[in-house]
Image (cartoon, rainbow, N blue to C red):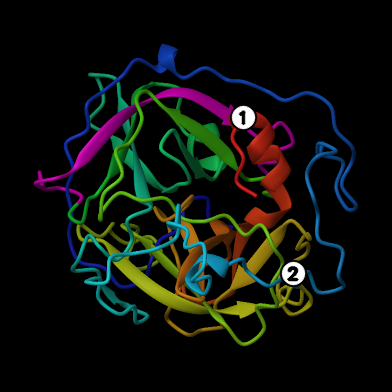
Amino acid sequence: MRLFLAILIFVASYTIAASMSVNQVIQKQHEGGEKPAKKPTTTPPDVVIATTPDGIIDTTPDDSYLTDTTTPKKPTCGVTSPLAPKIVGGKNVTSLLTFPWLARLDLEYDTDSEASDFCGATLISENWVVSAAHCLHDTDTDIIAVNVVLSDLYREKDEVGEVVIPIAETIEHEGYNGTTYENDIVLYKLERAANYSDTVFPACLPCNSYNYTGTDFTFAGWGDTSSGGKASAQLMEVSLPYVPNDVCAEQYEDVYNSQICAGGINTGKDTCQGDSGGPGISKNGGVSYLVGIVSNGDGCGTNYGINTRVSSFIDWIEYNTGETFC
């Protein structure tokens, strides 16, 4: 099972990240919970788990602001600039307008080590990003700085408009299981609010249900271009088809209702090491919804990828952020 996932087609990228002390990263836990159906890990009662046989969520996204001409509403998430390029799977990302909600977690280690690492994340409000719990949980303990990078294409270049914000608080899901990857979700509070622009804007959360059958999810990140290969310097993106949980479970011992799968078998397209925590986006009515968080899988491009199903954690997100998303 891979711990860090990444897009299979990549080229090069950069970011200068201002560091912060790990002491600024405060672990906050929401207590209480109930056991999930299959594994003895704790799932809080306010987490809504899908119960359909194949894990499909049936929904109709609220895009009323697009059609209501009597009381027009300004969109608050999930909308890109009209100048953004059309998304096509498996290519370099050439415009910051394409994924304004995409964030990167840059991890810096102590001065005795030249190691550096990163994970993907998604901006969900001006104060919060969401990512995969295993990104920080399963790394070395000598991390001295964690920074959120926004509005960035090239990981290894200093770009005009690039935004770097230290993390002020970390809220890892109390039921995270590093073996099964259940509840693989974490919230990071930004040290200061992100200023919205055409290249910095949150994704919407999937408040309503939706049948994803026959649809593709779009993933983006700077991860390895092959299993065990090198990370991409330039942001990459790929479109992967939704896979019902019962089909995904034919390849894995356990696939939980709080997870959602995408990809194919030996397709050469996938997420890979380094893309962990990044967004799986479903677009409906011109609005982009964060339906999955890259979590784990077997190989890169050889099997389905397993993602955290965001709709199962709406109540948990709202409880811990103190913000209303739905």
Foreground: 258 or 78? 78
Which comes sooner in the sequence, label 1 or label 2? 2
Q: Secondary structure at mark 2?
A: loop
The residue beneath circle 2 is 57
In this figure, what is the number of numbered marks? 2
Name the residue located 62 percent from the left edge and 68 percent from the top edge. Answer: 61
Mark number displayed over residue 322: 1
Q: Position of residue 242 (x, y in %)?
A: 60, 78
Could you tell me how far apart the alpha carbons at marks 1 and 2 are, in whole angstroms?
Answer: 25 Å
Q: Position of residue 324 (x, y in %)?
A: 62, 40
Name the residue located 20 percent from the left edge and 50 percent from the top edge. Answer: 155
Foreground: 174 or 161? 161
Q: Are marks 1 and 2 in contact (CB under 8 Å)?
A: no
Quarter that holds the N terminus? bottom right
Q: Amino acid at mark 1?
A: Gly
Asked if 132 appears above or below 6 in the picture, the reply is: above
> Which of the 4 image quarters holds residue 206?
bottom right
> Is residue 89 left or right of 16 when viewed as pictured?
right
Mark number displayed over residue 261: none
Q: Position of residue 24 (x, y in %)?
A: 42, 15
Asked if 323 appears above or below 261 in the picture, the reply is: above
Tell whether position 162 is magenta.
yes
Q: Which portion, as a residue range, is magenta? A: 155-179
Tell whether position 91 is magenta.
no
Identify the main secondary structure in magenta.
Answer: loop
Q: Position of residue 250 (x, y in %)?
A: 76, 77
